[in-house]
Amino acid sequence: MPTKSIFPDVEIPNVDLWTFMFARKDQPWPDDKVIFIDADTQRSYTFGQVRSTALTFAEGIRATWDWKKGDVFVIFSPNCIDTPPIMYGVAWTGGVTSPANPTYTADELAFQLRDSGAKALVTQFPLLPVARAAAQKAGLPEDRIILMGDQRDPERKFRHFTFIRNMAGTSRYRKARIDPAKDVVHLVYSSGTTGLPKGVMLSHRNVIANTMQNGYIESMNMHWGEKDGRPGDRILAFLPFYHIYGLTCIVHSTVRRGYTTVVMSKFDIEKFCAHVQNYKITFSYIAPPVVLLLAKHPVVDKYDLSSLRMMNSGAAPLTREIVEAASARIKCGIKQGYGLSETSPTTHTQMWPEWNKYLGSVGKLLPNMEAKYMTTGDDGSEPKEVNVGEIGELYVRGPNVFLGYHRNPRATAECLSPDGWFRTGDVGYQDKEGNFYITDRVKELIKYKGFQVAPAELEGLLLDNDAVDDVAVIGVYSQEHGSEVPRAYVVRSAKSKASGRSAEEEAESIINWLSSRVAQHKRLRGGVRFIDAVPKSPSGKILRRLLKEEAKKEQARAKL
């Protein structure tokens, strides 16, 4: 039987995103409460300024571009405190925001512009050359490119978003009529680990539901203002706003809950520590690479991080060893959560008091959700539900599950059933206490002679080796074994490099070290390769496909 959340269902208001955020009758904080602060410049928005700036922009695009319900607006920018008012302005019109990775090439951005059917694009001045080239490739007129952030165009060809206004003032506009359950508010693009990126359609109801689900858990311990003699919570935000993790968990939760959020344009470990110290940060959403840095980077010891009350890690599995190392060093709990773009994103999270009770778990199901683990069906059989404690593929159902993939009904049908079950593609299990565990992706499991090997498990163990600063494990085909075998790509530590051991000696030492800690089928029969850095997405996921491509090239060279 599917598992239902242990938490009571939360009531999800049947309204659009703008109404949910700005037309509520129970707003407890004043309009002059500071909501977003730029970490470097200290430029800020109060709650009232987010609302008024968004409304001005909404009327501006209506008047300037005859903006219509359903029109898509692409945001191509690093984290910026201008993102929320732009996004909410588009939502007021019934439009759709589609955030894009600011590291995209012109071709990659052009694909998103074309695929989404974008009618406008906002970017920052340093990214203007890429934005212009992409717009040209996609057939988007240059007068539909505008700027955000602190820099203006010195030639005044490209207007800043604050100058997109209803200048005539003769026309009065009304907020669009929106069906929260059917109308899309965000079109976010998957990372494209297999094939081209897919547009994930999230409705107003999807996003509102997940904001409410997250809020139910986090509001047990966080508050917008002073409570019990403690000042209001402050969040440090570096997770990319173009990713749904940052968009919902930070932007929407901040506006709905009234937290003060300090925004970093991108992550830097020393700046992160300095901002925690200087802004007295109490909470941060993070990713596994940051946990690793907090555990091992020497700069961490230079700063006072004592204001931190809790951090939440998502995007990829974390092992007990690395959580214990980081939390012991910075004297702060690190709880875990889980989600996907297709679930708006969060489906599971750990409770604050339980962060170190079930280390390695992603926590319990959020309110309003159901879940089950199923056999993967990779042998051609029909997937069947597995018992508690048995490994299977995770399926989830709830109001935060997406509408489908944009212009891709086939991909939608492959993972979303008519009765609302979403097949996540992630493998794990559930314990008797209702805690869920994610061990790997279905497609990333290594099949060694019939045995399944989870790369994340081996990575977690290897990170405990003094010679290893970072690591990724993939499966490579071995003619000798007639099977896939595990191979580790290791970032060698400074201590290891200073030891005088050759790369070959260190590789053999790592292989032997792991062999003494795992079952036979999990040994590194594919060897160890040393690399300068593990390739990762901005949200912290290991890009194993790049390592697999490198392994194929190595095999091809070996045959010559």
Image (tube, rainbow, N blue to C red):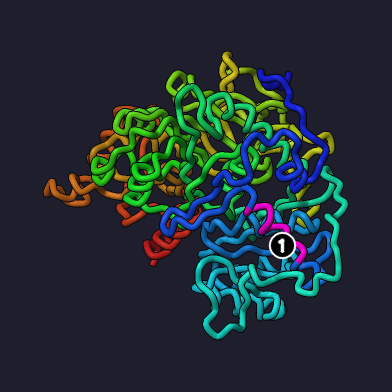
Residue range (magenta): 49-59
Instruction: Tell me the residue at 45%/39% (across/down).
Output: 455
Comparing 282 with 448, the one in front is 282
Placement of the N terminus among the 4 image quadrants: top right
Placement of the C terminus among the 4 image quadrants: bottom left
Residue 433 location, x and y as percent?
A: 57, 14
Is residue 343 a member of the stretch shown in magenta?
no
In the depicted structure, whether residue 274 falls above or below residue 136: above
Dominant SS of magenta comes to helix
Instruction: Specify few, some or many for label 1: CA neighbours under 10 Å numbering under 14, 14-19, or 20 or more.
Output: some
Mark 1 element type: helix
Instruction: Tell me the residue at 43%/48% (across/down).
Output: 478
Direction from residue 374 to residue 152 in the image, left or right: left
Instruction: Tell me the residue at 29%/45% (across/down).
Output: 469
Answer yes or no: is residue 543 visible: no
Comparing 453 with 436, the one in front is 436
Residue 121 location, x and y as percent?
A: 66, 69
> Which residue is the site of mark 1?
56
Comparing 489 with 125, the one in front is 125
Direction from residue 72 to residue 340 in the image, left or right: left
Type of amino acid under label 1: Thr
In the depicted structure, whether residue 469 falls above or below residue 43: above
The image quadrant of residue 58 is: bottom right
The image quadrant of residue 255 is: top right
Instruction: Tell me the residue at 66%/22% (across/down).
Output: 386
Residue found at the far top of this picture? 432
Direction from residue 444 to residue 90 in the image, left or right: right
In the depicted structure, whether residue 299 falls above or below residue 348: below
